[in-house]
Image (cartoon, rainbow, N blue to C red):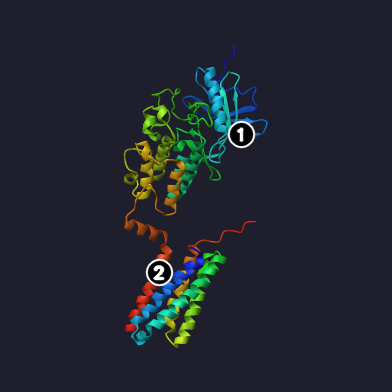
Amino acid sequence: MSKPLIGVILGAVLGAIDGLTAWFTPAVRDQLAGIVFGSTVKGIIAGIAIGFFAKKFHSLPLGILFGLLVGAFLAFLIALMQGGYYFEIVLPGTLVGLIVGFATQKYGKSPSPASS
Amino acid sequence: MKWLSDSKVSHLRAVVGNPDFSGTKYTFVKELARGGMGAVYLAEDTELNRQVAIKVLSTPEITEDLRRRMIREAQIIARLEHPGIVPVHDVGVLPDGRVFYAMKFVRGVRLDEYAANTTSTRERLRKFQAVCDAVAFAHAHGVIHRDLKPQNIMIGSFGEVLVLDWGVAKILRAEVSSEADTLMLPAAGTNKAGDTAHGTVIGTRQYMSPEQARGEIDQLDERSDIYSLGAVFYFLLTDQAPNDERPRTLNPKVTKPAEAICLKAMARDRASRYAGAGKMSADVSRLLDAEPVSAYRENAYEKVSRWVGKNRFLVLLVLAYLLMRIFFIFTSRS
């Protein structure tokens, strides 16, 4: 499995789980579908970006840092659109980015070096 | 009449047993080891200015047939060019008629000495893999070692692994020999018999296969070496020469798959052993990579445990994420 594909799958799954947890917040329960969709799309975007980064740069610390930044940035944008819940959205989003960053560095096929 | 001093007498006694390398390009340095059939000496190659190890046969009677076979077999072993097999540089005959072999002088420690100073099972098993690879190479060229044991494996000063003492090796296939034959080189530091007729036991008892222990020379094939590899594996897992105890009894840290690899290689029934050293090496590789090994069928719990053990950091991250999520659920409710 390629690194970007691992990023997409993991980002989508964790994003969806992230969104589903909104069910436990009664104030936003009626918007659950939109939240899950948005969170999944956010996870996919983060997964693609982090996956391609992992394909290009083979460094665990850099991969984790990049994942962390991408996750935090995208989660911040969502929180900005929501107009609140910064801590509840940004912190899990950052952790999801970190997980995807780690997983894409550790797993998945690296492109073989170009033959001359 | 002038008397010799005791020290001079003991010196003369020592040198009289040393081989006479005159007429060869080697000069004697010192004796390295001595066994039942011969001895190994450190010598200086005066042409290339390097040190070599020389094995010299010391049986009382050396027939022309034995000499001819030894030279021919040395030529075959010399063809086993592999980084894990100690190379034979030269073969010749001493002025007294004894055949000698010049080999690479390996600086390092024996596997048993290495194991005494290396507690990491991973490191030990990596060295073991290198042994398997060398043995697999020899098997592919139709040669079986017949005396694999920790004392015949050297770890060089750069970590390289070399299988030594092909003194009782057997040539199996016509690819390298016109007839199935037995190599009888002078062996050092081991208890070997001097004959290979049916019923004769060659090798080291604790590390030899049951068929070899019974002296069934014509029954020996690659699987006999597989048994010995299993015995070496047993030693690396337990720090003890193979005995009736299972490895996990002697060392509870040995995992079930590791024990299964060992027991499969050491199966009494030859057909139940690994079909080749390469296959055993592949299983050890899978063991090191925390992947399922062919010798052991794990249950669902063991599969999950292995996966979790292999992906510990990822599991911790996901757990941290889930804990955080649970924390937010409870705080948002309150």
Q: Residue at x 46, y 83 (%)?
A: A78
Q: Amino acid at mark 1?
A: Gln
Q: Residue at x 51, y 30 (%)?
A: B174
Q: Position of residue B248 (x, y in %)?
A: 33, 46
Quadrant location of the C terminus of chain B?
Answer: bottom left
* Depth check, front residue: B267 or A41: A41
| Residue B255 vertical placement versus B57 (above, below) | below
CB atoms at circles 1 and 2 under 8 Å apart? no
Say left or right for B241 vs B54. Answer: left
Say left or right for B310 vs B66. Answer: left
Chain bearing tag 1 is B
Quadrant location of the N terminus of chain B?
Answer: top right
Q: Amino acid at mark 2?
A: Val
Q: How many marks?
A: 2
Q: Which residue is mark 1?
A: B51
Q: Residue at x 41, y 72 (%)?
A: A13
Q: Position of residue B294 (x, y in %)?
A: 39, 48
Q: Secondary structure at mark 2?
A: helix
Q: Residues within 10 Å of mark 1 (few under 14, many from 20)?
A: many
Q: Which residue is mark 2?
A: B318
State the image quarter where residue A114 is shown: bottom right
Which mark is in front, 1 or 2? 2
| Residue A93 vertical placement versus B62 (above, below) | below
Say left or right for A14 vs A3. Answer: left
Say left or right for A45 vs A115. Answer: left
